Image (spheres, rainbow, N blue to C red):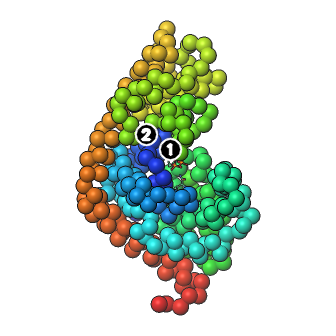
Amino acid sequence: MKPVMLSAVQPTNKLTLGTYLGALKNWAKLQHQYDCLFFAVDLHAITARQDPKVLRENTYRAIATYLASGIDPDHCTLFVQSHVPQHAQLSWILTCYSYMGELSRMTQFKDKSSKQGQNIPTGLFTYPVLMASDILLYRTKLVPVGEDQKQHIELTRDIAGRFNNLYGEDIFTMPEPYIAPIGARIMSLQNPASKMSKSDPDLNGTLFLDDSDDLILKKVKRAVTDSGSEIVLADDKPGVKNLLTIQSAITGKSIQDIVATYVGKQYGHLKVDTAEICVQAIKPIREETERLMGDLTHLNGILKRGAESARERAQKTVALVEERLGFIPG
Ligand code: ATP
Ligand code: LTN
């Protein structure tokens, strides 16, 4: 039996080149080595206000983008979180086994709640418990995520350990983060000190997977570079480093090999080449995503199959947890 691997993205906007290189591209490879579950977390998305029409569109689009990036529903379980009610069910139970103190220490909560003003939704606070439930429902061994999510996986381990200690070591499997070697941190084109992100208000910093060829060329050509003119990998050249990393993550060539092709050349060359490489990477994903978005019946069919399989697996865990807690059978 292959070890279980699980990951998810919030359908809060269109996905970005960062999501593709940091998550989807790796998932597509990993689906052949592991028993993989990939999904779109709409329950997590509503921790921030969503327009229903936009949420619906983004959820379909996220799934279509997964498929366009090579995720194959015949090789993994592909679904939408809200289609599997066990996520919310286990989440309530685990809320009773998590502590205010540990949730208050979560960096993502501190960041996001500080931007919320007075009325901070309770869901933003308990967000990591829902994520722990996502992971623990399926006996997950590995969770491919970016650096920013490591703290949530640590918390998941703490909650799992606490619960197992009380009710039996056979209940939850201890998950571990799986951080991909390349592409783990693609930075904003406008501010190479911060992560390329789908919620960045500066649209020029982010390459969306539905950007047109022209827009991709424009954004990359306007990317912030550094002082000096030499194309080398150096910490004081974060803009250049980011473009080299993007090229490397897309082409699979090492950064050293890429740098070697730029001896005596200028930033302009690096930008033009990176822009072209990004167009080549994004164009087929954009076109395939659009094609899939034109046939929601087909997408619904894939999601139905995924949800059925996920529900069956998730229910086994919920039933075991409820039995151990002393709930009587219904
Ligand atoms: P938001 O801006 O809404 O917080 P995001 O763009 O940062 O979202 P997430 O939905 O938090 O993206 O991330 C989805 C997955 O993609 C995670 O596993 C995350 O680590 C990865 N990921 C997102 N952006 C990047 C990036 N710039 N570089 C590498 N990986 C990324
Ligand atoms: N919190 C994650 C999204 C997420 C997730 C998960 C990732 C929700 N549930 C389970 C991995 C496993 C994020 O913001 N990127």
- Looking at the picture, which amino acid does disc 1 mark? Lys
| Residue at point 30%, 62% (across, down) | 300
Q: Which residue is at the front of the view, 107 or 138?
A: 107
Residue 89 visible (yes or no): yes
Within 8 Å of ligand 1, the CB of disc 2?
A: no
Viewed as shown, does residue 69 lie left or right of 15?
Answer: left
Within 8 Å of ligand 1, the CB of disc 1?
A: yes
Which circle marks residue 198 in the picture? 1
* Mark 2 crowdedness (10 Å alpha carbons): few <14, some 14-19, many ≥20: many
Residue 313 location in percent, x, y? Answer: 42, 72
Viewed as shown, does residue 187 lie left or right of 60?
Answer: right
Residue 22 visible (yes or no): no
Residue marked by disc 2? 208
Residue 243 location in percent, x, y? Answer: 50, 27
Residue 142 location in percent, x, y? Answer: 51, 56
| Residue at point 56%, 57% (across, down) | 48
| Residue at point 38%, 46% (across, down) | 29
Residue 277 location in percent, x, y? Answer: 38, 28
- Looking at the picture, which amino acid does disc 2 mark? Phe
**Callout 1: helix, strand or loop?**
loop
Marks 1 and 2 close (CB-CB < 8 Å): yes
